[in-house]
Every structure is written in structure tokens, then in C-alpha cells.
Image (spheres, rainbow, N blue to C red):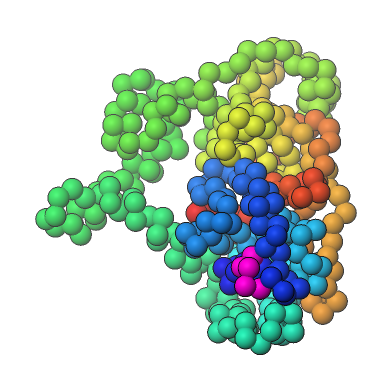
Amino acid sequence: MPNQFSRLWFDSRYHCKDFYIGNSIDNVSHLMQSLKPPMEMARLPRSLSERKFWKASEWRNFLFYSPIILIGILPDAFMRHWWLLVFAIANLSSSNISTAMLTKSRAALLKFVIKAESLYGLEHLSYNVHQLTHLTQYVGNWGPLWATSAFPFENNNQVLKRLYHGTNGIANQIMKNNLIWNQLNSIYDYLFVPCSEEIQSFYHHLSRHSSRIVQNAFSVSHDCIGLGQPQLRFLSDNEKAALISIFDNTWLHSEVNSFARFMLKKKLIHSHEYSNNTKHNDAIISLSSGMYVAVGSLLFINVSNSKVPVIIGTELRLRNFSIYDTDVRSNVAVAFRKVSFANLVAFKPSHFESKCLMITSERGAHYVIEWPGNDLTS
């Protein structure tokens, strides 16, 4: 679907149509390529001039970040129409789908298909567009879209290729080595418990996990692991003020160990400052409270003769942003949160919910989206 409609928007053969925005293709490409997605989204956005070479996962990603990129560029009637599709697909890709979500998604897709004829013309009402009218039925029968997606199988082809050597008995080689690999993975969570370098080295040799990440690790739990050499520093006044929300009036040591890179529930997190120097932004996260945060650092604080892990970051304060559709009876932009950078906050690692993508519109506004189903792999 994104492939078909992007062709209409940017192909010069439609330059006389109201939906044509080909004159803005360089601007849209610039906005896309300025995106810094989490590292789980392996494929960075490419220029629209290369779209004929895009992989299926790139089109899937484009669908979800395109509404923000196209704000102020795609004419309003076509923009509101596009929101219907994004809303429905985001709903149908969620980890938990209610009956109400199915009902609203069905209404959004039906309206999308009906309006596609009047906005783009009957000749563009393709079979793929018609298929959207059956999508909620498929999800009702078989589960979220990601549950029947082919992307995980494609992503794991590279894993299978590493599980055999030579051309004899390939199936048996894959089965045997996969069983061994699974056993190694079952002890992966416990590797970071302090152990000798010999044991770590032996594990690296067997599993081929990156020793660069593992060798310099500091852990107090399986869900929270500092990576690299910690920086010994003193808390700032603003950080102390933020920590009061966790420790009340408990006396805190001003000297702390600080990590710019760490693992939370098996997800790699970078500080916002660290992410500024990389192609990916792994600092934007959501918390179980519903708050969004740009992570600053992981701190290990001395409290009552023990080291307590705490994360410091900048709150991303929610701003009003809603695109209400009267036929769907819902805010079709519900998956997106308009935010602005606010004050420092502190929270415990256990409050981490998921990694998010931050998108900046042409007008400079910031939005975050929790990837539908939290499936960022591409």
C-alpha cells in the first residue's frame, strides 16, 4: 500500500493531480533521512529517489513514520485519508487487540477504500486496496499482523546460514547446531553475573556473541546491565532534585558511577547525548506510567552500603495532538504523541516499558511512536 500511494504522490506522470507532491520529494527525503531510529530498525530510511530498491520492511516502516513527515506537505484531504490507513494498521499490529479496536479498524479501512476512489480515481482502486476490507477479519481469525508476518522468517535466514558448513546433511546440521545454540541462549541471562574471564572467553567462543559488549559489563540484576567503563562523577543539583522522588529524604552519596550505554530487559539503551553521535537513537523510551523519556544515563548510587541502579533522563511532556474522525469515532493519530523536552526525571529500571521512535516534522515539532507490537526488527 505505501508503495502504490507513494508512486501517485511523487511520480511526475501525475503532476496535474491534486495529490501530487513530487516537487517536495527532496524535502521529504531529507526529513526521512534525518530520522534516527532505534538500532532494532536495522535499515535506515533511504531517499525516495531510491524507492524502487526499497525492501518490504522499508515500506512497512515508511507507513508508520510517513504521517508526521508528510504534515504540511500532503494536502489536508489526502493527509486525513492516509491517517485512516496508518491508524488501522497500527491497531491491527498491536500486541493486545480488543473488540473495540477491531471495530474501529474495520470502519477506518472501509472509509479508506471508499474515499480512495473519489480522491485518487477508480483506476487506482487496485485489488490490494480492496483486500484491506478483509484485513480485520483475518486479524480476528489469526491474530495481529505481526503474528503472520514473513519478516521474522526472512530475518532468520542469516541465522540458519551460520548453522551449517558444507553440503552434506544440511538439515541435520541445522537441527543439531540449533539445539546447541538454544542451550547457550538459555544461560545468556546469567553471563553477566560476575565470573572469571576464562568462563566469559569460553562462552564468547561458543556463542559468538560480541565480546566487546560483554567484557566491560556491570550488573546488579539480569534486567539492568551497565556497558563499557563507568564514569565516576558527581551528581548535579538538578539530578539530586530528580532523585528525591525515589529516595525521599534518604542521604545520597554525591559520587556515582554513570553509564551512557546499558541493557534494560535485553534492550540496548544509549543516552540521548551518546545517540547524537550515532546513526541510531536508542534513548527514547516509554515507562509503565505512560511517561516518555529521553534517557540521560544509568547511575549506580550508593545507598545504605549498596549500589542501587537509577536512570536519569529528560521528560518528554505530552502536547495536544489529535485528529478525530467522526465516522471512525476515534482519534486516528492515537499511536503518535506530540512531545516537548521538559525537566529531569529519575526512575527505576523496572519501570521501563519499550523503546520508541522520535520523528521531527517539517515544522520542527517532535513526535514519538511506540512501534506497533513493539516489533522494531527490520
Q: Quadrant of residue 95?
A: bottom right
Instruction: List x then y, in percent, for residue 242.
Output: 81, 27
Instruction: List x then y, in percent, for residue 139.
Output: 58, 75
What residue is rendered at 35% in x and 26% in y? 200
Front residue of 375/108: it is 108
Q: Quadrant of residue 137?
A: bottom right
| Magenta stretch bounds | 10-14
What residue is rendered at 84% in x and 36% in y? 342
Front residue of 99/315: it is 315
Front residue of 119/174: it is 119
Q: Is any atom of residue 355 visible in this view?
A: no
Left or right of 306 on screen, residue 203: left
What residue is rendered at 57% in x and 18% in y? 230
- Total residue callouts: 0
Residue 286 painted magenta: no
Please determine whether, in this image, residue 251 is positioned above or below residue 374. above
Please determine whether, in this image, residue 100 is positioned above or below residue 74. below
Q: Is any atom of residue 222 visible in this view?
A: yes
Instruction: List x then y, in percent, for residue 340.
Output: 82, 42
Instruction: List x then y, in percent, for residue 375.
Output: 56, 55
What residue is rendered at 69% in x and 46% in y? 358
Task: In the displayed orientation, state which residue is furthest to the right.
Answer: 320
Q: Quadrant of residue 231?
A: top right
Principal SS element in the magenta part?
A: helix
Task: In the displayed orientation, state which residue is furthest to the left.
Answer: 168
Please determine whether, in this image, residue 197 is positioned above or below residue 134. above
Q: What quarter of the picture does the N terminus occupy? A: bottom right
Front residue of 110/363: it is 363
Please determine whether, in this image, residue 60 is positioned above or below residue 116. above
Task: In the displayed orientation, state which residue is furthest to the bottom.
Answer: 122
